[in-house]
Amino acid sequence: MLENDSPSGLTLGSPATTAPQGSNTSWVPKTPVVTPDEPIFLMTSTAQTISGFFVWTALLITCHQIYMHLRYYSSPNEQRHIVRILFIVPIYAFDSWLSLLFFTNEEYYVYFDTVRDCYEAFVIYNFLSLCYEYLGGESAIMAEIRGKPIESSCMYGTCCLWGRTYSIGFLRFCKQATLQFCVVKPLMAVITVILQAFGKYRDGDFNVASGYLYITIIYNISVSLSLYALFLFYFATRELLVPYNPVLKFFMVKSVIFLSFWQGMLLAILEKCGAIPQINSADFSVGEGTVAAGYQNFIICIEMFFAAIALRHAFTYKVYMDKRLDSYGRCAPMKSISSSLKETMNPGDMVQDAIHNFSPAYQQYTQQSTLERSGGPPLSRSHSNISTRGDNEKTLLLSSDDEF
């Protein structure tokens, strides 16, 4: 007698690829099913051990780097953004490892990944802000590129901007396109949790009645727009950023965030097409999309080890070491390190920047210049200690008729 109502008779080596007779045939092969007697790799202690080794090694490497940046916290306006960027490794790695440990509970990974999704948007903003700090702020950048024609390049997506020149509107677009990702990403993460609670979300479920399809579309649009803005900014300032070795920095931030997103979507599609087996067990529930998410988390655990090494070279603390030593060659005390960490993780500057860039009165603002004062902090913001000529120049740079 055939067991038509239960897939437990199927094994890993015998996927059911023949569609049933009738009018409702489908070109998509049925996903092979793994029984409890034949657990997949993600359910084994070997997978947890391997992923744990890479995760904890990455944590040690990155936490040491963060500590050294806080110990030699000589350029707060730069290192604040660097420390925030570096925190992506511990958050990504530990979040993915926890998701893997709770793999047999299909709902847990959604809540863990929500934290990861929210923080990666924060990282994108801080990377662009770091580039602004490297170049001295908005006014200093405009003083260098304003009025120059935008070079047409299909590689950087500027072929449609032929005949235009760089303006304050150009920089505003780059900031706005980045900040919108900081809003869309956490918002979609919260919506995902809500849909998950009502059974309306499954990774890899492209059914029009499922929320995954629409969230994926919105994610792709938001991610692509943010990535395009970073490309435009780099294309406009690549010569100015040469002293700061921007190539490795740009590559690492983009690969960690953007490639991991498309990597997860590819795995979801592979599971939907039957390339990744599902699990059937009476002891626990593993729904559609969970296995693909599990492989995504396992891969991220390994990738974060290599990301930690690359970020150590991309955002080295050694350039700030000599600046932090006092006249006796001593570095900052622990109290100073803790206060620096508290100041670093305060997102107030991002909120203020969002208000500034999306405000209807944006053109009436005068962006503060980043100045280096001798005998004082290397970088500071100043409103009044600037000459009248400088104020006039900045007002001209931010005039209301200078749109992108």
Image (cartoon, rainbow, N blue to C red):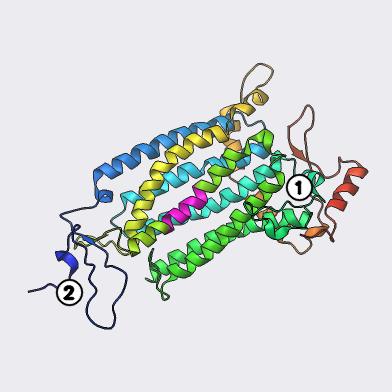
Left or right placement of residue 379 versus residue 1 in this view: right
Label 1, label 2: how far apart the Cα atoms are? 65 Å
Left or right placement of residue 170 versus residue 340 in this view: right
Q: Image point 24% across, 52% down: which residue? A: 40
Q: Position of residue 130 (x, y in %)?
A: 65, 43
Q: Image point 45% across, 47% down: which residue? A: 92
Identify residue for label 2.
5
The verdict on residue 26 being magenta is no
Residue farthest toward the top in the current orientation of the protein = 328
* Quarter placement of the C terminus: bottom right
The verdict on residue 264 being magenta is yes
Label 1 residue SS: helix
Q: Image point 30% across, 62% down: which residue? A: 274
Identify residue for label 1.
138
Q: Residues within 10 Å of mark 1 (few under 14, many from 20)?
A: many
Q: Residues within 10 Å of mark 2 (few under 14, many from 20)?
A: few
- Give the prevailing secondary structure in the magenta stretch: helix
Residue 400, placed above or below residue 56: below
